[in-house]
Image (tube, grey):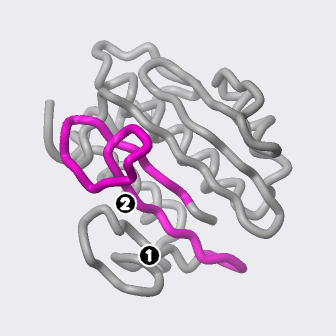
Amino acid sequence: MRGPLPAAVLALAAAFPAPAPAKTAEEAAAVNMQLAAEICLRNYRTPEKVVDAFTAAGFSLAPGADPGTHEVTAPELWGVIEPGSEQSYCTFQSSQVPLAMAQAIGTALAERLFPGQVQTGHPERGLATPCDGLSVFAPRRLIWIHYAQAGNSGECIDDGTSAIILNM
């Protein structure tokens, strides 16, 4: 299943309150990516609640490599969260979620959680590539949702993997 996020996967995401044991690895990864990103976005103004929200949702957390960070894992998903009062950061990656699916997840979440406040592209330079994502003009904070291939390159390469990155 490659391409835009199918309606069935979006429906699965709504049906699972915790990291999901879905029928396929790709479905599990997509549902878990959506849930993880939603937890970060819903708590952008209350970063002190982020760690507890991930724990309550059933994600595994461990201390991150840098002070104030936490490593987050779920089936077919791994990531890092850095909740902060001035700025928060969340990134979730999967070798099972294609880039277009991560982009569809981010767009659907942004439009549902922040209707009328979403603009395509980087907040300062507009749209250079599809990976520049979205600027969300949320109350009291600008949120930038962008994408890359999974791994540490940060490149906009469609290799069947993805990362969704939330700068809040």
Residue at screen point 80% across, 35% down: 52
Q: What residue type is labelled 2?
A: Thr
Q: Which of 118 and 7 is in front in this view?
A: 118
- The CA span between labels 2 and 1 is 9 Å
Residue at screen point 39% across, 32% down: 94
Q: What element carries label 2?
A: helix
Q: Which mark is residue 118?
A: 1
Residue at screen point 60% across, 77% down: 142
Above or below — where is 9 with respect to 99?
above
Q: What stretch is highlighted in magenta?
A: 138-166
| Residue 2 point in image, percent of width and height | 14, 36
Q: Is mark 1 on a helix, strand or loop?
A: strand
Pointers 2 and 1 in contact (C-beta within 8 Å)? yes
| Residue 67 point in image, percent of width and height | 81, 43
Residue occupied by mark 2: 107
| Residue 15 point in image, percent of width and height | 46, 29
Asked if residue 125 lies in the magenta stretch, the reply is no
